[in-house]
Structures are given as structure tokens and as C-alpha cells.
Image (cartoon, coloured by chain):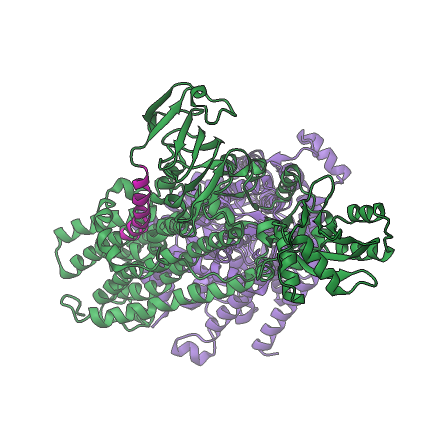
Chain colours: A purple, B green
Amino acid sequence: MSVATSGWLQAGLLVFALAVTYRPLGDYMAHILTSAKHWRVERGLYKLMGVDPEADQTWPVYIRSVLAISVVGILLLYVILRVQDHLMLSLGMPAMQADLAYNTASSFVTNTNWQNYVGESTLGYTAQFLGLAVQNFVSAAVGICVVATLIRGFVRTRTDRVGNFWVDLTRINLRLLLPFSVVFGIILIAAGLPQELSSHLTSVNTVTGGSGSLYTGATGSQEAIKMLGTNGGGIFNANSAHPFESPNGFTNWLEIYLLLCIGFSLPRTFGRMVGSHKQGYVILSVMAVIWAGSAATMTWMEERHWGSALAVAGSSMNGKEVRFGVPGSALFATSTTLTSTGAVNSMHDSYSALGGGTAIFDMMLGEIAPGGTGSGLYGMLILAIVTVFVAGLMVGRTPEYLGKKIRPSEMKYAALYILATPSVALVFTGIAMATGSARRSMNNVGPHGFSEVLYAFTSMANNNGSAFAGLSGNTDFWNTTGGIAMVLGRFLPMIFVLALAGSLAKQRHTPASAGTLQTHTPLFAGLLTGVIFIVVGLTYFPALALGPLAEGLK
Amino acid sequence: MGGGLLDPKMLYTSLPDALKKFDPRVQLKNPVMFVVEVGSVLTTFSALEHPSIFAWTITVWLWLTVLFANLAEAVAEGRGKAQAATLRKTKTETTARRIASFEAGTKGRAGDRGVEAVVSANELKLGDYVVVTAGQVIPGDGDVVEGVASVDESAITGESAPVIRESGGDRSAVTGGTKVLSDEIVVKITTKPGETFIDRMIALVEGAARQKTPNELALNVLLASLTIVFILAVVTLQPFAFFAGAPQSLVILVALTVALIPTTIGALLSAIGIAGMDRLVQRNVLAMSGRAVEAAGDVNTLLLDKTGTITLGNRQASEFVPADGVTIDDLADAAQLSSLVDETPEGRSIVVLAKERYGLRGREVHDAAFIEFTAQTRMSGVDLPDGTQVRKGAANAVRDWVRDNGGHVDPAVGQIVDAISAAGGTPLVVAQVKGSGAQVLGVIHLKDVVKDGIKERFAELRKMGIKTVMITGDNPLTAKAIADEAGVDDFLAEATPEDKLALIKKEQEGGKLVAMTGDGTNDAPALAQADVGVAMNTGTSAAKEAGNMVDLDSNPTKLIEIVEIGKQLLITRRALTTFSIANDVAKYFAMLPAMFAGVFPGLSKLNILHLYSPASAITSAVVFNALIIVALIPLALRGVRYTPASASALLRRNLWIYGVGGLIIPFAGIKALDLVIHLLPGMGR
């Protein structure tokens, strides 16, 4: 089978699998978020937490709950990493230094999973399982909780209650993430991922003919939630390019499916909850078009590399695993940068300038196609609100989305949301470029060196977590600013989403008429796509011009 | 008043006002233009420090950008000021004849009014009574409590024909500043001096009372955040540029910022708002707030009074239906005979119908006794000298009359009557007593006549997504027939003011915005409850107080125009925003290669316009940015064209014009400017 055929086959099967699971998975998530029944084990947990599962929270209480569990999560993870040498099953690994522990804790709690450390030689089993894996579940669930409140904002009328965070969190973990992780973990293990808790080193032979030894760990079970929860923090530094994390073409394909499936099914959940599947399909189509367009662009950039040697070779295999080839790598790179996952199966830094630039642009879109679990959908819905606002008044009416008016207060929160992430990304990139100690971490000069810094802060601000290589990230400057960027990039938008949800829920429902801008039409989908590209393009164009464009346009 | 076209002379006369607006405290109200002004100050210092032709050119054009924005606002305000000046003339010092006490029914007995004192109009208090006689100006807003007078209201309405104002009923309100032409009236003052209708009108047209509307606020949020994003993008660009080895001068960074932030809409925003109010004033409608105008654009439901709005004022005879054995000519003759001196509109229409359709001329009948209509008999008619009696009137009354005179009533007549009622008409039965017997001759079909073109109007409204509800005191059967004929979506029959209020509340409960017109005092609660309440100027002052708009022409059909103006205002603002944002794409393509192609030759590929030199490219973008404001002032004042259509159709059309147009026009404009500017000194490669 030729490389191109296998590429088409992989992509085709992926689309097919996502299409097949769209309805059942989306409906199931809607059921989780709306069902009135509690499982017995959930009741037990609520009793333990001292939570009344029937009492919904106002948006300030809800966001305080989100922030509380996140602060506690960061502190707990920080302590685990700092005292790892005293914990069991730590394989003799030393404690993590303070700034790196802070960076890592922020990274995993914010669903970013930026890694300034080398997993296999830094962390023992306890830190991996009790520390990181817990956050892989919690941070993924928090994203879905927050988008649930926004959807409820559209559905509910004249109330200040947007849901109960503890109920949402418990249900999403118990009913969705845990069972799915178990099932897919088993499939991954069956497909060849190692799963053991030994403190023995496994001997491996390297391609260059040498040999080395590694702790293999429970990679199979970790890998499932790493992808399913759009986390992306690998046990191994090489992440999904490492043969233990993804040994073959099938696991590569399955991992791409896992990181996309929740994000692409949430529009169905949205459609079901607001009572119009067409609204869900519009959001889905915008996500799908951006995803497919980006995958095609990136594959094309990599297949047709501008450079004589590479042109002769046929394509750019630089930085890619021979097991996956260009299509398998580009598909993975597109999916991981569009979902805030940040797992990688190839070195994005070694992509062609414009291919790598596409990866940066993907993240700049704000992780919305389909984006991280929950966070992708709320980002997309905010952009839909902005689109409705821009387009709605062109028909001469106060704009409405799903029967809710977009008034000054709604617009304020949407605008703040749109402002937050680019501000964090650009300001921190600016600070880094103006700071000598930051620049000393750069191993490359010229536009490529700049692209690496731009990639890093774009990735952290958008909670993606993948990295261009070429930066020595484990320094005071990068650990500290990175930690701040990730926390701001995660929680500022969440605060605005919840405020918006609260504001929407208070409104009464405005019935649609012939004068209402319809939001379930191809015209609206096209408009939304246009607004996304214009907003992002206008914001980041100067930065992109000095990085990937300056490097790539010859 | 002009149709909103820009008179070049106005640009010149508004210049002093525009210059006053350079005050930073004024600019601060408009964040976008404030940033431009701060940028202009920065470049001025920079140009003083490192003078060059390029730096000074950019500096001058940045200042011009601010000036053009000020000019747009000043021109819009200037039009209002001219109107205010005319109004002020009517407000020249008036005196009032205040009376100490007033009791109803003392007309003509001046002694009972207590001591009359001549005071300044400004000293009047609420509840004072004043006497106004022919030739005097009414000193303040109030209600006529006694007397009838013809009043010249041309000062406010522009309509020179005098109107009648009388005590009691719905025509009692008078406005300060208008002139009594005949007779004498006693007016109870209902408004404090300084808050009268004319005072409010002056404040409104001058724009002094203008508050930002919700949509304007929401738009400001969007514009402010876009401004912040672009400032951030430019400020962070400098460290990137340093790293790239191409640090940019302050002049260029400011130029880029100003080109990117939405100056076009920022400059025209307040002009659009003022012009929107102005367009209403031109149609003789006074909106008490900009909010009301915007709400008009959002309205979902229109409550329209049947009489005067949907139908002509009165019922008219449309058909004669003879009873069995009676010729239609006999019926027409009798009907006309009975109506010859009937001065009601219905009576006149019967005479006209008989003449037009059956060639019966009006005639003089001597020695005939005419029987007037009374509420008791519910009939009118005529008794001729030969003993013939003719009657027309309500079916039951006429049937009883025939039986009383020994006649027999054919049951078929009952069927005709029912059929006419079912069709929404009013049946008038005609009968006569001639010689020996009494006999029913037939039935006149009186019909409400729906105004020409009103059905098409309602179809347009439906397309815009607006539901129309007809309000009438008629019975449901009649109401339904007229509703069907006029094409309204719904009707409220046998409506009382309470029903009206309940209907408005019900619609609002469902999240809808409701507009209505009204004139009577009993309309006041509904006018206050409606989102857009248009009071007729002929109405009572209670109605005018309660509504948020006043139609000086007192034309209820105007509600539809008001809705269109509201929509036009919303669309204009948003279309120019889209245009403004779409412009940025071209500006990036002009300016970024100019700034960085020196160090990264590859970026010259982005110079798709092949602009001559970096200096020329940047100057062209800044000049375009300034000139486009001037070019769009007429559009801002006139408003974009609004044609009633569905939301999708409107969106598609406006997206093409302002979105796609906004992408393409600046490319062409900047290229054209570059062809000229590159010839100037200091713009070389």
C-alpha cells in the first residue's frame, strides 16, 4: 500500500468512526448532563463531599467551585512532585525542583500538559498515577462542566442557576471518562502498549544498534485518558512518537480518534440540549471544515516541501516517525494542535516552515475545531455569539442566538473571552523576546527561533501543551512565565464563560420570527468560519509574518 | 428638509465645532478616536525630534483623521442645531394670563375666575390655570379645561392648517408656543417651564439629551476590545521586530495601530445615531430616546387601531340588496330618499352609491319631515307630504316598525342581514309605508373600506418577521372579516383599554417587543407598557406623556415607517462596522511587507499590490484610512438602503456590499493613492 493510499484510508476511517459515534456519544453526554437520576455510588460520593446534588449553583458559586478544585489540584500536585523521593514506587527518582514542579502542576491542572521535564527520567509511578493521571481526569471533566453551564444558559430562562459543579464533575468522571478509559486502555494494551508496575528496567535495542533500558510503566491505561481527555502529557518525552506509547499504525490511528471523539461529539450534546440538532450540525460542520482544511494544508505542505533535496526525496520525512509517514504524522499534528491535546507523534519543529506555521495557526484559532473536551465547544459558541452580533444587526434587529439576546453584558463577556487568550500569548511572547535570559534559552536564530518562542506561548496560553523543540524550557524564566500563562489562559476564559452563562440564563426566551437571523443554515456556518479566520488572522498576522511566513516565503 | 445628502457647505460651517472637539475630554467618550488623537500627539513629538517628510506627512494625516471624525459628528449635530434654532424662535418670552381660581361652567363670567394676573410664562407652576384668547400664544403645555379654539400648531408640526382644541375628550392637549387663532380657552398647565414639549424637542434635535443605546453600548464593547487587541498586536510587535533586526520607528507603529483599529466606524458612530433621530424628526416624529428608535427596529408585534390605520375612518355603503319582489331601483331610490339630509358619513355614502351606480341624482324634496337617528329608535328616515314614510336602520328596529304598521316581514330578509353581518359588513334595513301597507324593501350593505396598499404593507411586515394585530371595538365577526381583507395576522375584537394592556403584557411575556399607537387618555397605560408607544399629537397630554414617541402628523400608519427607520439605524451601524473590520486585511497587506521586507525579502510576496516604496505604502494606507471617513459621511447621515426582506436575504445582501466590498475597496483605494503619493518628495524607495 502506498503512503498516499494509507493516508487517505486512515483519514477516511477516522471520519467514518467519528461519524458513527457522533450521535450515540453526543446523546449519551447530553443524558449525563441532564438526567435527574443519581447512581447509588454517586449519592455516596455526594454525601462524602457534603453536597446536595439537587441544589443548583449560581454562576459565581459554580466558578468558585471550579477554581477551588483547581487551586487544590495545583497545590496537591506540587507537593507530590516536591516530595516524590519519599513516596513509594518512585523508582528512586529525586524530588522535582520548585519552579519546575510549579510549572508541571499548573500544566496538568489546566489541561495543558506542557512538559518541561523528561518523563521517563524524572517521574516515578506515584507521581504519574496519583499526581498527573488524576488531573488528566479532573481537568478534562472541568472543561465539559463549564460548557454544560453555557448550554444551560441558552436553555434555561429567568433563573440564576447554571448547574451543580460537583454533580457535573462526578458524573462526567464516573459515567464517561473512567469507563471509556478502561475500555480503550484494554484495547491499546491488546494492540501492544506495555502495562506493568515493575521497578525493573526493560532493555531495548535502539535503531542505531545500541541498547538502553527504560521503565515501561502502565503506559496503556495512561495513554487512553491522555488522548480521550485531550491532555497530551506523555509518560515518555517522545510522547506518541515513542514506540511504547504508540507501537504501530493502528494505535496511532486509535489515539487520533480518541483525542477527537469527545470534541466532535459535543455539538450533538449541544444540539440535543438546546432542542435543535441542526444547531449542533452547524457547529460540527464548522469544526469539521477547519479540521479537514488544516489536515489537508499540513499534509500538502509536508508532501511538497520547498527545498531541492526534499523535493527529490518526494516529501519531508524530517522529524517524522517512519512508522507513521507524512499523512499519519500530519493528521496527528493537525488533530493535536486543534484539540488542545498537545500529544505529538512527530517533531513539529522539524516541519516545513509553513507546515509548522499551520500548527501554530491551528492553536491560535483558540482550540475550537473541535478543541479540548468542553473548552473547544465553549470557545466555538463564544465565536458564534460574536458572529451573531456582527451579522445580526446587519438585518436590523438586536441579535439573538438560540432565543437569547446579545446585549451589552453578553457582548462584554464574549469580547473579554476573545481578548484573553491572544493577550496572554502575545504579551508573554513579547516579554520573552525582550528578556535576555529568555532569549538565551533559544537554540535557533532568525525567524525560526522566533517561531519557537511564539509556538511555546501560543501553546501554553491556549492550553495545548505541544512544543516546538529548540527551546531549553526548564529555566526559571520559562517555568515561571509558562505557569502563569497556562493558568491565565485556562481560567480567565472560564470565568467569562460562566459569567456569560449566568447572564444568558437570566434572560427570557425570545421566539424566532422571519426577521430573526437563522443560525442553523450553511450561510451562518460560512459566516462563523469567516469570523474565526478574520478575528484570528487580524490578531496574529504581524507575529506570523515575522515567524513562519518570513521563514517560509522565499 | 433635505433627504440627508451632504451639502459641502455644511463641512465648512461645521469646522469650528469640529475643532472644538479636539479637546481630549470630548475624545475620551469615543475610545477609538481617543487612541488616534493620542497617536497623533506621539507622532508629532517624534516628527519634531526626527523631522522627515515621511514623518510629517503621517503626522498631518493622523491629525486629519481626528478632524474628519469630529467633522462627521459636527455635521450631524449641525443639522439638529438648525432645527433647534427655528424652534427657539417660538420660545421667545411669552406672558401668561394666570387666573386665581377656576370652576367648570363659568364660561363668560370673568368675575368667577378670581383675580387675573399677567405673569411671565416661566413663572407658571403645575396646576395653574391660564386664559388664552385669539391672537395670543399658549404659554405652556396643558389641557384645555374650558372652551373651544382653533390653534395654529405650525411651529411644531410644520402643518399650517389650524387644528381644533376643545375641553374634554381626546383633543384637549395644547402645546406651549402654539398660537390660538380664534375664541378663548382656559388651559390647565401640566408641565413645568423648561420641561415643555418644545424644550424637550430642542434638546432632542440638538443631541444634548442623546444617551447611548443598548446596541450602541454593545458595539462600543466590541470596538474597544478590537482596539485593545490591535494595540497589543502592535506593541508586542516591536520586541519581535528588534529580534528580527528591523526595529520600527514610533511613527510607523502609530500609523499601523491607527490603520488597524476600527476608525471608520469609530468616527461615524455618533453621527449615525444623531442622523437616525434626525430622520425621524424629518418625518415629524419625535422620539423621546434613542432607545425607543432602536426598540422600533426590534419590534415583533404591531398593534394597529382599525379605524384610521387599517380602514378609512368610516363605513361606506357598498351594495343594495333588494327583498323579494322589489326592484333594485326602487330600493336605491328609497335608500337615497331616506339619506338626503343625513349628514353622517354613512348617509352621504348611500347617496353617492345610488348616484354612481343607479344614476339617481340628489334632489330637493319639499315639505318632507326628516326623522333623525336616535339611540332609542335606532332608525332614521323621511316622511313625505303624500303620506309615504321611509325608514332605514338596524334590522330589529326596522322589522318592528314594519310589523307595527301592519306589514309582513319576509324571512328571506333575515337571511340577507345575516349574510352581510357574516361578511363583516353592517346591514341597514330599508322599509317604507306607502298607502295601504308597510314593506321591507331591502338591505344596504355598509362596509369598512380597507385603505389602499395596506395589505401589501402588511405582507412586507410579515416578511420582516413582524406580526400585526388589529385592535377594534367591533364584534368578532366583523373584525374577522376586516382582518382577513386587510391581511393582518391577528385581531382583538370588542377591545377595551384593559384588553389592549393585557394583550401587550401577554406578548411581552413571550419575549416579544410590542409597538402601538394611541391618542386617548385611556390608551395611556398601554402606551406606557408598550416598548414603542407612539402618541398622536392630537391626543391628550396623558397619552403624550405615556408614549415614548410623538407623531406630530397624528398619522397612525406612520408606525410602519418608524419600524423601518429603526431597522435602518441598526443596519447602518453594523454595515459600517463590518466594512471597517474588513478593511484591515488590505491594510495589513500594504503595511507589513513595507515594514519588514527589508530584512525578510520573502515577505515582499505579500506586497500583492506592488506598492512603490515602504514610505509610500504606509502613507497610502493612512491617507486611505482618513479619506474613507469623509467618503462615508453621506452614507452615515442618510442610512443604508433598507428594503423589507427576510433576515437571510438582508444578511446576504449586506454581507456582499459591506463585507466583500470592505475587503476589495481598500485594495483598490490604497493602490490608487500609491500611484499618486509615490510621486511626492520623500516617498522614494
Judge from the rendering whether residue A369 lies leftward or rightward of residue B273; answer left or right: right
Judge from the rendering whether residue B186 lies leftward or rightward of residue A164; answer left or right: left
Q: Is B75 a magenta residue? A: yes
Magenta stretch, residue numbers: B71-91
Is residue A194 visible to us here? no
Judge from the rendering whether residue A30 lies leftward or rightward of residue B556; answer left or right: right
Please identify the dominant SS of the magenta region. Answer: helix
Residue B498 x/y as whole percent: 65, 36
Residue B424 x/y as whole percent: 72, 54
Q: Is A427 a magenta residue? A: no
Quadrant assignment for the C terminus of chain A:
bottom left
**Most foreground residue, B119 or B290:** B119
**Most foreground residue, B618 or A394:** A394
Residue A50 x/y as whole percent: 67, 29
**Relative height, residue B198 to residue B240 (above, below):** above
**Most foreground residue, A329 or A100:** A329
Q: Quadrant of residue A64?
A: top right
Q: Quadrant of residue A518?
A: bottom right
Is residue A295 visible to us here? yes
**Most foreground residue, B202 or B246:** B202
